[in-house]
Amino acid sequence: MTEAPINKNIKTSGGKISFPLIFLVLIIIMTVWIYWYNSYIESENDNLEADKIAPTVAKINDIKKDNNIKVYSLIQDNKKILNKLESFSDITNIIKWISYIENNYDLNLKWFNYSNWVVSTKAYTDPNRVSNWYRATSYFISKYRKDKKAIFKLPYISKFSWSKNIAFNLKLEVKDNLINNKK
């Protein structure tokens, strides 16, 4: 086998500084400068916090000690719950919805009791208003559950009676979105 001839005439840069060495030095200088600049910015931020932010935080803490501000904060923090409780006590809206059920679903509600956000009542079909009692009751049960504006949750009806008309007990729980659905 013959070996490839080695070129002994390779020229080196000798005393000249090569490009990679210059690039390396430039990168080192930039790194040192960026490190120094970052330290400078951090110290300025610390000074700014000490001079401007700390007194403002102290003022905020002083304001929070005021009882009127505490009450306002409590009201703001619990505004959603307070609005919900207020809407649950909107008796006129509940009465309007009971009237709406009677008029739109051909049912009569003999009486009603409203307690703990639940309306209890007895519903029945009126033979003078409706000839097909079963369809009127079925229509109410199927359509009311699908009514997006309804303020009551209609539970499953587990007991009803049928003689001259259909009668059943209703326990209608007020939905959480009562506020947005006033008739």
Image (tube, grey):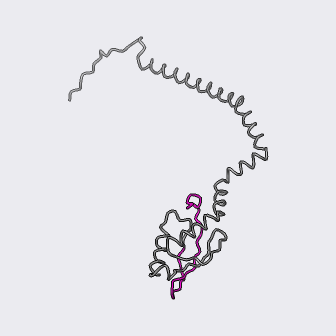
Q: How many marks?
A: 0
Q: Position of residue 144 (x, y in %)?
A: 50, 70
Residue at the extreme top of the image, as rendered: 15
Who's the residue at 76% across and 41% down the image?
63
Q: Is residue 176 above or below residue 24?
A: below
Question: Can residue 159 be found in the magenta stretch?
Answer: yes
Compare residues 181 and 176 and report the one nearer the observer: 181
Compare residues 6 and 33 and report the one nearer the observer: 33
Who's the residue at 58% across and 65% down the image?
175
Residue at the extreme front of the image, as rendered: 128
Quarter occupied by residue 168:
bottom right
37 sits to left or right of 71: left
Q: Is residue 85 above or below residue 19?
A: below
158 sits to left or right of 11: right
Q: Position of residue 43 (x, y in %)?
A: 65, 27
44 sits to left or right of 5: right
Question: Can residue 51 be found in the magenta stretch?
Answer: no
Q: Position of residue 166 (x, y in %)?
A: 51, 83
Q: Is residue 14 above or below residue 66?
A: above
* Image quarter (top left, top right, bottom left or bottom right) of the N terminus: top left
Who's the residue at 75% across and 50% down the image?
71
Q: Position of residue 106 (x, y in %)?
A: 50, 75
What range of the chain is rendered magenta?
Answer: 155-183
Quarter occupied by residue 113:
bottom right
Who's the residue at 67% across and 54% down the image?
78
Residue at the extreme bottom of the image, as rendered: 163
Compare residues 52 and 153 and report the one nearer the observer: 153
* Image quarter (top left, top right, bottom left or bottom right) of the C terminus: bottom right
